[in-house]
Amino acid sequence: MWARIEDPGCIQDWFPGITASTVNGTSRIVTLGSGFTMPEEIVTSDPLLRRFQYRIDFPVFRHHLSTIDVIDLGDETSLVVYATDADPRTLALVIGAATGDALLELRDQMELGGGVPVPADPVRSDSKGDHA
Amino acid sequence: MGRKILLVTTDQQRYDTLGCNGGTLARTPVVDGVAAAGIRYERAHPQSVVCMPSRSTILTGQYPSTHGVWMNGVPLPVDAPSVAALLQRAGYRTALVGKAHFEPYLDFFGRFTENSLAASGRETKQQPWFDGTTGPHRGFEHLEFATHGTAGTLHYARWLAEAHPEAVGMYYSALNGELEVNAAGGGDTGAPQVHNNPITREWYHTDWVADRTIAWLDSLDADADWFCWMSFPDPHHPWDPPESEMDRIDWREVPLPAGYPEAAAEREQILDAKPRHWRQWYDGTLVSNYEAPKDWVPATLTSDQVREVNARNAVECELIDEALGRVLERISARGWDADTDLVFTTDHGELQGDFGLLFKGPYHVDALMRLPLIWRPAPSAGVGPAVVTAPVGLVDLAPTFCSVAGLDAPEWMQGSSLPVDDTDAQTRGFERVITEWDSELFGVGVHLRTITRDGWVCTAYGPGFVHDGTEGELYRLADDPLQRENLWDVRTHRAVRDDLVADLRDHRATVHEPRLALEAPV
C-alpha cells in the first residue's frame, strides 16, 4: 500500500477523477477528469512514518493540505487515513468526497490482488453513494 | 404506434406565474392553451423543494427518503429505478434535453456522467440498471445538458464557447469565488442574482433547449414512439434573461405580490410566528441551506427589488412559453399532435418576495410547494378537459407515463397515475400529498415533513440545529391562502394537528439504506 501512496506519479492509478500527473521534484501537476490541471506541492513523503502530504497550489483555495497515513496493522493489512483540510468550505466538501472515493478504490485494488488501475474510460461509471 | 410523451419541466417556477393559474404578469398563451385542452391541477406539490431530490422523484416515482437523494449534492445512484428506462425497454425512443441535475454540478474531478458526457462526444453511456441489466444512462438514449449559465462542462456551455465565445462571459455568475451562491446584485435595483445579460436571444439557454429538442425530434422516424424530457433551466435565478427582451415588462409597473407584506413590521410579525429559522434567515443570522446566498440578508430586500425580480422572472416565463410553442409546432408538423401527451410542470417553486424572502430553503409554503402542473392527454385518448383540486404530487408522474405507454406501474413506484378529474381522484384515493426536507450542511441540520390534506398544510419539524422536534406549522388554506397565521400552537386546532401528524407518520416512505453520501454542495 505504501509503495502506491509514496509514488507521486501514479496517483491517477488509484484516485478516481485524476486522469494524469507529472512530477518534477516536489512539484506535481495533476489533470482532473473535468480537464482542469492543478499544481500541487509535495511537502512530506516519509517512509518511516509512512506519511505523504501535499498542498494544492491553486488560486481558488485559500488553504489546502492533504495527509495520507498508512498504518501497518501487523497482520498483512493496513489502515489508510486520508485527511483533507481545505478552505473554502465548499471545496473541502468536494475534495473530501473525492478522497473518499480514492480510499475505496485503493481498498478495492489491494483486496483484488493489488495494482488494478482505474479504468482509462474518461466517462466513469458512477454508481455512487452506496458508501457512507 | 402508441402515444408519445413530451415532459416539459421548468426550474423553480411558481404556480401563479401562468395565466391559466391566475397569473397576470407573464403572458403564457401556449401553456394556457394546453391547459384549456387538458387537465390543470390546482394542488400539485413536489416531494422536495430543491432540485436534485425533486428531479429524482420525477424520474424514479419515489419519495426522496426512498430514492435516497435527501438533499442537493447527493447523487442519484446511476442504477436507481427510472421510468425512462422502462419506456426505453418498451420500445420508446428516449431523450433528456436541458437541465438534468441528478448528479452534483460541482465536480472538478469529472466523476459524474452528467458533467463528463459532453466532452466524450457520445449521446449517452451504457450503465448498470436497477434490474441488473445494462442500458443507456438512466434510460435516456440521447442526452444534451444545460444549466443556468456557462459554468461547467455541459453541452450548452461547450456549444456556446465554441459557436459564440464572445457570449460566454455575458451571463451572471451563479456562484462566487468561494463557490457559494452569489449575493452580488445588479439590474436597476441591485437585487441579488439580477444581471443585465447582453446575450442574443437565440443563444440563450431557453431557445437552445427548444432547438436541441426539435433537432432530436427531427431525427426520429415518423412511426417512432418517444419520450422526451425537455427541461428548461429557467426561471430559476440568476434572473438574467436577454436584455433585448426586457422591454416586455417595466418592473416599475409590476404590482407587489400578495405574499409580500410591504411593511417590515408586518413581515417580521408573521415570521416570528413561524419556527425560529424563518426569522433567523430573514435577519441574516442563520442561512440554513446552500441554495440561498450566504452573504445576502433578506431583511435588506426592497419593494423595488421584489418588483424587478418578478418582472425578470416573468420575462423568462414568457420565453419558455414561446420556446414551447416552437416545439409544439414541430410536433404538429410531424403529424404527431393527436398521439402526443404533454405534461408541463416544474421541480419546485420560488419565494419571489413572499414574506420578504427570495430563493428557496426549508420553508414549506405555497411559494415553494404549489406547482404548475398540466397534463394534456393525447387527443386520440379522448380524455376531456378538467380542473383537479385534489392533492397530487410529482411522485405521480412516473406512473402516469407508464399508464400512457400501456405499462403497469412497477411496485417500486410510490405514486399513482394522475387523476383525470376530481371524481377519478376521489375514487382512487388522492387524499394527501407529502413533502420532505432534509439538509445537513456545514454543521446545520434541518428536517421537515409536510402533509397537505383536507385543505390543511401541516409541517412537523424534526430535531436539528435550531429545532428540538416539537415545532411545526399549520395553515388552513381556505382561510389563510398566503400561510401567514401559524396555527400549530392554537389549542382549538390541536385535534386537527394531531390527526395530520399521525397521518404523516402513517405514510412515511421507506428509507433508502444505507444513507447516500453528500458529495458536493450542489
Image (spheres, coloured by chain):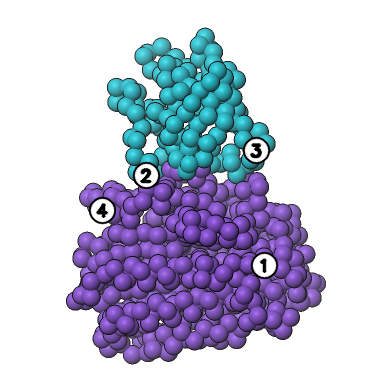
Chain colours: A cyan, B purple
Quick check: A54 above or below B340? above
What residue lies at 75% left-to-right and 66% top-to-bottom? B190
Res. A59 mark:
3
Question: Secondary structure under badge 3?
Answer: loop
Q: Nearer the viewer, residue B217 or A17?
A: B217
Which quarter of the image is occupied by the N terminus of chain B? bottom left
Q: Nearer the viewer, residue B286 or B222?
A: B222
Q: Are marks 1 and 2 in contact (CB under 8 Å)?
A: no
Res. B196 mark:
1
The quarter holding residue B242 reads bottom right
Instruction: Give the residue pinned by disc 4.
Output: B135
- Crowding near the residue tagged with mark 3, few <14, some 14–19, many ≥20 C-alpha atoms within 10 Å: few
What residue lies at 48% left-to-right and 26% top-to-bottom? A22
Amino acid type at mark 4: Gly
Quick check: A31 above or below B175? above
| Image location (x, y in percent) of residue A130 | 38, 42
Amino acid type at mark 1: Asn
Question: Secondary structure under badge 1?
Answer: loop
Question: Secondary structure under badge 2?
Answer: loop
Name which of mark 1 and mark 4 comes first in the sequence: 4
Q: Chain of mark 1?
A: B
Relative horizontal placement of residue B173, taking residue B433 as reference (left or right) = right
What residue lies at 22% left-to-right and 61% top-to-bottom? B89
Q: Chain of mark 4?
A: B
Amino acid type at mark 3: Pro
Instruction: Give the residue pinned by disc 2.
Output: A123
Q: Nearer the viewer, mark 2 or mark 4?
A: 2
Res. B268 mark:
none
Quick check: B85 above or below A51? below
